[in-house]
Image: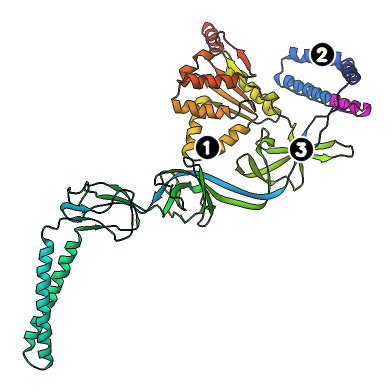
Amino acid sequence: MIFTKIHQRKKYSKMRNIIYFLTVLILLVSCGSEKEQSVSNLIASGNLEDLRTKKTEISDQQKQLEANIRLLDSAIATKSGEERLPLVTTIKAKAQKFDHLLELQGSVKTKQNVLIYPEMAGTLQRVYVKEGQRVSKGQLLATIDDGGMGSQLAQLETQAALAKTTFERQKRLWDQKIGSEIQYLQAKAQYEANENFVKQAESQLGKSKIRAPFSGIIDNVIKDQGTVVSPGPGSEVFRIVNLSNMYIEVDVPENYLGGITSGKDAMVYFPVLGDTVHTKIRQTGNFINPNNRAFTVEIPVPNKKGNIKPNLTAKVNINDYSSDEAIVIPQSIISENAKGDQYVYIAKQSGTENRASVHRQVIITGKTQGSVVEVLTGISNGDELIKEGARSVKDGQNVILAGNPGTGKTHLSIGLAIKACMEDYRVFFTTVPRLITQIRESRSQKTLRTLEGRFEKYDLVICDEFGYISFDKEGAELLFSHLSLRAGRKSTIITTNLSFDRWSEIFGDPVLTAALVDRLTHKAHIVNMNGKSYRVKETKKLLNN
């Protein structure tokens, strides 16, 4: 880290003031009277183009004068050894492994969670299992009264046995060339018919027995013993669940199609259990849902402890991008100018101890993960980056412009925004209703995290028209959470036509209102702009004319 701090002395201050005064005086003596007369003549002539040309010429001279003064200040400070340098801290850029995780939300499912229905009508004669009991595939769960079908099966089996004996005897005689062929064929047909009757009866009788379709746990015994049941909806007897083959199905936006493939690492977090499971993607969908422009991804969830249940909510982080040699830096040290270019300050050690020369470096960033972002170009491994001490909006103070409609609140806030942009600060201007709509859309499109990161990084955010339109509880909570991201760290300007004691009319929640007012007004500048509307004044003036 580099720490630089030299106090300015009174001698330097006096010398700078003298140089400034002499420079202005020389300029006024050399050309003051001539230019003043020239400007007067131009104004008297009334030529608009000449006036504009003259204004541009004088403005250029003013800028040149200011530049010369700055050069003189720098030269005086260097020669006198009283140069005042800012105090900064730096961090070193290092190439490291970077994994970007896409955060999604889903719920646990299982393909073996079924309701068991009876296959025949009758009285539920006996139930052999109870809730919570583990059963294996094919195990007998319950029986239904067969209505005498067992006796019919016994009779058919007796007839089948007789037909079999008759056929075997007739076959021996036919093999010895005794008897006619028709007698042999009739015996064979009779035997085969009786065998089919027995199999059919056994199949029907088997429907009176309810068996487990797979190994699992009896989650619910729905019908009691003695209940009359029949096939169809409403006659469920058991629910059986297998908790060993669980999975999560999530919807992934289509723009991640190239980065999300089978075999990619995934991390599943269960907020209720406080447990995390590391797994891999098992299957990706081959269809883009036109309603949400997303495809499904199936992620298996090992359930060794048995505490993961179907429909349990989970947060899923999927690795959609990795780099082994990435330059990763904190988002907080990145600034953005009015053109949208992102930049950082790089410090290079000079010959003097604890001193460095600093230059602004435009960078191109890639994916963001949490509070850090990958830098694609502009920074090399080992560069010293200024972490603290780079220019930022003074003390992160908030400004609240309160007043009646038409008193210039929006006009003033836009003027402050333009000035901040001219100083290379990153500014975001929006209305409160538009901001809430943007937050809601981002949440539905699963890009809320990206919006929060951008919103938090702006040097100045201006929220206009607070109090003109009320919003529901959800909108109030979304606005509160976003403005809280900047509290005490970055500057926010809010224009409102309501006093603080009426803000609860907009939020609808006194507790939430008090918390937001407390955060916004802490170390804030509150400008009271009550008065007569300029719009009404101008309208009356036009009507009178």
Distance between the Cα atoms at labels 1 and 2? 59 Å
**Residue 311 shown in magenta:** no
| 234 displayed left or right of 168 | right
Distance between the Cα atoms at labels 3 and 2? 51 Å
Q: Amino acid at mark 3?
A: Thr
Q: Which mark is residue 90?
A: 3
Which quadrant holds the C terminus?
top right
Q: What residue is drawn where x is 10% and y is 86%?
A: 169
x then y, percent, for residue 427: 63, 29
Residue 428 seen in this snapshot? yes
Q: Judging from the image, what secondary structure is the residue with disc 2 in?
A: helix
Distance between the Cα atoms at labels 3 and 1? 31 Å
Which quadrant holds the N terminus?
top right
User: Residue beneath label 2, please?
Assistant: 36
Residue in the foreground of this view, choosing between 400 and 312: 312
Q: Which is nearer the N-term, disc 1 or disc 2?
A: 2
x then y, percent, for residue 55: 75, 20
- Crowd around label 1: few <14 · some 14–19 · many ≥20 (10 Å): some
| 218 displayed left or right of 296 | left
Foreground mark, 3 or 2, reads: 3
The image quarter in which residue 205 lies: bottom left
Q: Which is nearer the N-term, disc 3 or disc 2?
A: 2
Q: Is residue 373 above or below residue 189?
A: above
Q: What residue is drawn where x is 51% and y is 45%?
A: 275
Q: Which is nearer the N-term, disc 3 or disc 1?
A: 3
Q: Amino acid at mark 2?
A: Glu
Instruction: Specify the principal SS of the magenta part.
Output: helix
Magenta residue span: 68-82
Q: Which mark is residue 141?
A: none
User: Residue beneath label 1, please?
Assistant: 448
| 129 displayed left or right of 276 | left
